[in-house]
Amino acid sequence: MSTKSVTLKSVTKTFIDDQNKFVHAVSDVNLVIKQGEFATLLGPSGCGKTTTLRMVAGFEEISTGDIFFGEENVNKISPNKRDCTMVFQSYALFPHMTVFENVAYGLKIKKLPKEEIERKVDDIFAIMNLTEHKTRMPSQLSGGQQQRVALARALVMEPGVLLFDEPLSNLDAKLRLLMRDEIRRLQKRLGITAIYVTHDQSEAMSMSDKVIVMNKGKIEQIGTPQEIYQRPKTKFVADFIGTANFINGKISKVTEDELFIQTEDSVLKAIRHGDFSVDDAIQMVVRPEAIHLLEEESGEIKGKVVKSVFMGQTQDYEVEYNGVNLQVTVHNPMGERIYQVGEIVSLHFPRESLHVI
Ligand SMILES: Nc1ncnc2c1ncn2[C@@H]1O[C@H](COP(=O)(O)OP(=O)(O)OP(=O)(O)O)[C@@H](O)[C@H]1O
Ligand SMILES: [Mg+2]
């Protein structure tokens, strides 16, 4: 199998809607997805994920820019000649064909010899534990099983690039988790380049080598799940991925590796990433689980508990500080002191927990 890298260079898509107005669905997208990489397009509804994927597949013509599979410019290559297959949210199985026939269909169209088709389909069924279902009709399968068949149908073609558009959104929560692992396992095992579209951040975080966060047709940030979570470049990314607290401040001192930030009533220290100057007005992003609550006055700031909820694995707090309610999560609260609403607590921000944007 020859899997391929995918490169988008200044790709733009402008639709003209029913009232003759321009819709800038995708604006100047630049992107490299390496061979064998699992990349996810993540963003809110309408941000241009599906449009981007459809341009890669060739279902949608691009307005300007270039798309490459490996070194080859595929702008002019029709979808059925591009070396990629797409798995959809609706499984789109042929209802009048058995599971075997559904999966074999594409290979038949390619006119492969019968024995080869049987061998390839049986191999995929074995990998995916579908062998026992091969003589059934799609209507005799559960939603999850149908989606596995749809995945098998895509994989059996041994595409250079595998595309997914929210393939799990019709499944229940538990099955989604199982299918995440299954897709990831198969993709790694077969080493196929995959582009996956979702608006579910936990799906993106748990499956991807690379996450591409989109907003209003543009890329906000590209990075590993850790980079996106720990070092969001913009407020949008910080807010969209997980829960984020924002604290306003002003840079009071810059050293080689540290920033000192003046808030209304204290000075916080953060690790420096990027260029900042004294007096820059900035925002700090801090995740709820990164803040430490202390009884004694050893934290950098003081706040008042306005919410305290036991969640089992965690104790979730809201602590008011200078008119902002900070979300604080304490893991494994069993051995910890539980603070009640109305108590004044001291908050400690480890240097590495504060990220300045
Ligand atoms: N054929 C079309 N004609 C006009 N506008 C379109 C067309 N297809 C998509 N759009 C618009 O382009 C924008 C991006 O749509 P797209 O389907 O790519 O979003 P998405 O990120 O996949 O959203 P969702 O998460 O809801 O699936 C939207 O504003 C949408 O209304
Ligand atoms: Mg979509």
Image: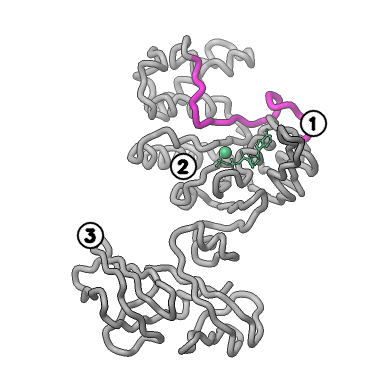
Residue 24 in sight here: yes
| Magenta-colored stretch includes residue 91 | yes
Which is more N-terminal, label 1 or label 3?
A: 1
**Residue 203 in picture, x, y percent from top left:** 45, 47
Q: What amino acid type should be assigned to the residue bearing mark 2?
A: Arg
Q: Which residue is mark 3?
A: 312
**Residue 21 in picture, x, y percent from top left:** 75, 40
Residue stretch in magenta: 75-94
**Horizontal side, residue 84 vs residue 23: left or right:** left
Q: Which residue is mark 2?
A: 184
Q: Residue at x 58, y 17 (%)?
A: 107
Q: Residue at x 54, y 40 (%)?
A: 191
Looking at the rendered structure, which numbered label has been put on residue 76? 1
Q: What amino acid type should be assigned to the residue bearing mark 1?
A: Lys
Q: Residue at x 38, y 24 (%)?
A: 130
Mark 2 → mark 3, Cα distance in angstroms = 30 Å
Quadrant of the snapshot with the C terminus = bottom right
Looking at the image, residue 231 lies above or below residue 157: below
Task: Give the mark toward the camera: 1 or 2.
Answer: 1
Question: Are the residues flagged by discs 3 and 1 in contact, CB closer than 8 Å?
Answer: no
Quarter of the image where ligand 2 sits = top right
**Residue 287 in picture, x, y percent from top left:** 43, 68
